[in-house]
Image (cartoon, coloured by chain):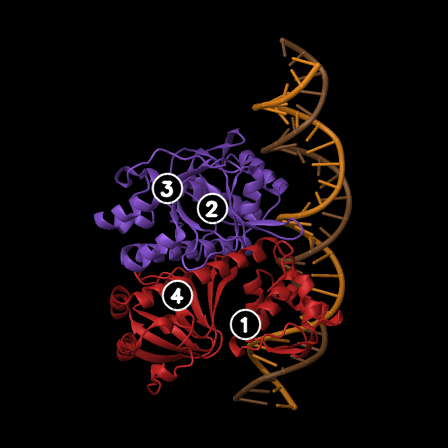
Chain colours: A red, B purple, C orange, D brown
Amino acid sequence: MNLRLARTSCIECPIRHRAVCAECDDTELAVLEGIKSYVTVPKGGRIAEAGESLDHLSSVVSGCATVSKTLADGRRQMVGLLLPSDFIGRPGRATLSFDIEAATDVTLCRFQRRAFEAIIRSSPNVARRLLTMTLDELDVARDWQVLLGRLTARERVIHFLLSLVRREATETGAAHRSGPVRLELPLSREMIADYLGLTIETTSRQFTALRKDGLIKTPTARTIVVPDLVDLMPEAMDEDGAPSA
Amino acid sequence: MNLRLARTSCIECPIRHRAVCAECDDTELAVLEGIKSYVTVPKGGRIAEAGESLDHLSSVVSGCATVSKTLADGRRQMVGLLLPSDFIGRPGRATLSFDIEAATDVTLCRFQRRAFEAIIRSSPNVARRLLTMTLDELDVARDWQVLLGRLTARERVIHFLLSLVRREATETGAAHRSGPVRLELPLSREMIADYLGLTIETTSRQFTALRKDGLIKTPTARTIVVPDLVDLMPEAMDEDGAPSA
DNA sequence: CGAAGAATTGAGACGGCTCAACCAAAGTGG
DNA sequence: CCACTTTGGTTGAGCCGTCTCAATTCTTCG
């Protein structure tokens, strides 16, 4: 399940400025460079399992992974989506509370737990960056809680689509809030359902409903075209009447 | 809305060993001692509002506060419960994304944002502790996501009760997993409903159902007695068949 | 071309929501 | 001190959105 990649220099790393290492100076980067190793997990592969002990921490370099929990009777809820630059693992604790799986082929930049924990102690830049990233994840998790607790199926799906659009926008830098947008869904319907706390069927029905309402087009099941974002946004039901950034 | 308290020494502070300052040495503690101030917010008072800029960070010393978001049409979802030793605010960012309100009278130990951020930079013990606490909060938020996305009303209420029991246990140190337990609910039915992503009515009905099933007794609306925890736990539906710690 | 997996669609059941009445406890004012 | 209001909680009846179960279509890939 693992495939060693050619060593890439941190300097030309695609996630250099967004990952845990974002605030490192050259010296710190050199240390990380020394202990890192790349690994690729194929689509569908397990990256980590709840309860099992992890001896590597890592950053997602490319691809998309899911964080989820499965109940004894099979009910499943996704609680996190890991994209390039996101961090996996918990310094200071060996075990994880959730399953992590590759939704697409995923390339990881891994660090030995021990070595990384030492770096955190010696390099406040890494520690601070990790704190910021964790606080951001906490905000995401809490917004997700609002979605799961209070939004209707239609609102959830719209929210999901808008979040993908927003992410794409921040990645490419293009900040268009109107006009047509094309999306490649990184997740299957089943995964989207697990993401949104719905069933596959309800999720699918919402997509067709949105299509019939002319809010989206679906050239293929995995491709969504939004003719005009402005039509979608008023239905998103964000907080308190504030414009949904 | 604020009431200044007599200055209490950090040494005899009830949350000394669990809050952000838990890992501080005497020198660091002295610095914190110098910049802290106590404030009490009465039950129902707003501690902070989403979007507004906060110039104090603080620890909850006593009482119970809620973190929540309200949608434009009034739907409300609680996303966090703040108890003694929990931290409020985000170093490195002035604004909060959620409303924070006092569910009971709440006493806070406050620090000027600027001063505290300086401490974080100079004292890795505080930064590390804050990272650990944030990671813990993230785990809580994600378990909460599972509850909101996949559990039935009955399961949610049972989960809620068990989480209160567990918290009480860790506070007092007593770790009984069977036998009668008495709980004082810190939240009204409305707040519990917002916590669980349900309506007041459904929440109330679940309490009566549990009472009729003999799993709990309700001497008053705010007091729950659990005759035997063991009866409640199998219904909690925790992950994957693992015993619900 | 056939098989397996993914997605869609339909029909009916059910859990939780809405709306509304009712009740108990705690203030409040004459 | 007692009617009146207010607040928080419970209960009931009916509706609606989502789930369940099942059949069908579409897609991918050997």
- Identify residue for label 1: A167
Measured as percent of width and height from the top left, residue A29 is found at: 30, 77
Answer above or below: position of D18 versus A31: above
Q: CA distance from mark 1 to mark 4?
A: 27 Å
Q: Residue B82, position in %: x, y?
A: 44, 45
Please tell me how crowded label 1 is: few (under 14), some (14-19), or many (20+) other residues with Cα within 10 Å: few
Q: Which residue is mark 4?
A: A49
Chain to which the residue tagged by mark 3 belongs: B
- Nearest the viewer among B186 and B94 is B94
Q: Amino acid at mark 4?
A: Glu
State the image quarter where residue B16 is shown. Answer: top left
Q: Is residue B18 visible?
A: no
Q: Are marks 3 and 1 on the same chain?
A: no
Q: Looking at the picture, how far across and down is residue A4, in whole percent?
A: 34, 84
In this rendering, does residue A175 appear at all? yes
Residues at marks 3 and 1 touching, judged by CB atoms closer than 8 Å: no
Which residue does the numbered mark 2 point to in the structure image? B81
Between B37 and A50, the one lying in front of the other is B37
The answer to which of marks 2 and 3 sits earlier in the sequence is 3
In the rendered image, residue B13, in percent from the top left (x then y), is placed at: 30, 39
